[in-house]
Image: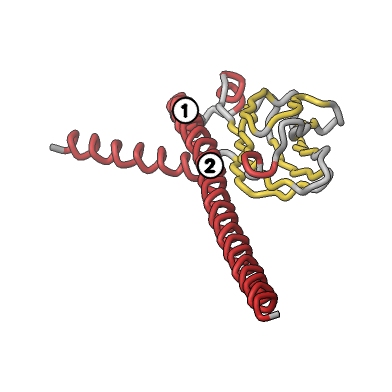
Amino acid sequence: METRKRFVHAKIYLACTFITCLIGNGNVAALSITVTEMECVSEQVLYEGDTISGNFVAIDHDIFWSPDHPGIEFTAISPGGSTVFSLKGTSGDKFEFKAPQSGLYKFCFRNPASSPETVSFYIHVGHIPNEHDLAKDEHMDPLNIKIAELREALESITAEQKYLKARDARHRYTNVSTKKRVIYFTLAEYIVFASASALQVVYIRNLFSKTVGYNRV
């Protein structure tokens, strides 16, 4: 009986530890950025070799971008000032790389176009303890490594969901904007049609008035 209680307590402890790790570990940032020319976001990376991943989507792409639009440029810059990842001429994409060193990383968006662009940006810094960490910390349980691996797998799914959500939001925004344009265009057509009809009526009345005047003469 006592052994069973210990087993139940151990399961509860592991569940609580797992939930705590999911909530507490790893840096996650999700935000919306308006890019006029150049906008940068900074993120602290605590350990060399950490996995930096994320995605971004230009919300205005389907509505205002012409076929010759240059696209958004994305650059990840290390604390030493070197470029570790870059993308050019895109309306959105995913990225992932290993941090070459710890420190403050910059993630910059450049907009070559004249009109401002709204960008949905999501970033995650993941850390999985390795054998070196186990050797340094004798209190670290190998189970923590498995928990960290599960956490990162779950984070990968979450990041994909956020990316798809951002793309879906862009499509919804496009549909709403298109509907508004159709409504405004239809109203404009009705106004032009009504104005043309009114002018025709006035013109015909004036024409008949002149005809009656000629007949009287």
Q: Residue 149 in the image: state x and y as whole percent.
A: 48, 26
Q: Would you call the spot at circle 2 few (<14 residues within 10 Å), some (14-19), or many (20 or more)?
A: some
Task: Nearest to the eye among marks 2 and 1: give it.
Answer: 2
Residue 91 location, quadrant: top right
- Residue drawn 54% across the image and 40% down it: 25
Task: State which quarter of the image contains the N terminus.
Answer: top left
**Residue pushed farthest front?**
217
- Residue drawn 57% across the image and 38% down it: 26
Query: Is residue 134 in sight in this rendering?
Result: yes
Residue kind at label 2, given as amino acid type: His
Checking the image for residue 79, the label placed there is none
**Residue pushed farthest right?**
81
Q: Residue 112 in the image: state x and y as whole percent.
A: 83, 38
Q: Residue 18 in the image: state x and y as whole percent.
A: 41, 38
How far apart marks 2 and 1 lie (CA) works out to: 28 Å
Q: Residue 87 in the image: state x and y as whole percent.
A: 74, 26
Task: State which quarter of the image contains the C terminus.
Answer: bottom right
Front residue of 91 and 204: 204
**Residue pushed farthest left?**
1
Checking the image for residue 171, the label placed there is 2
What residue sits right under mark 1 in the picture?
Answer: 153
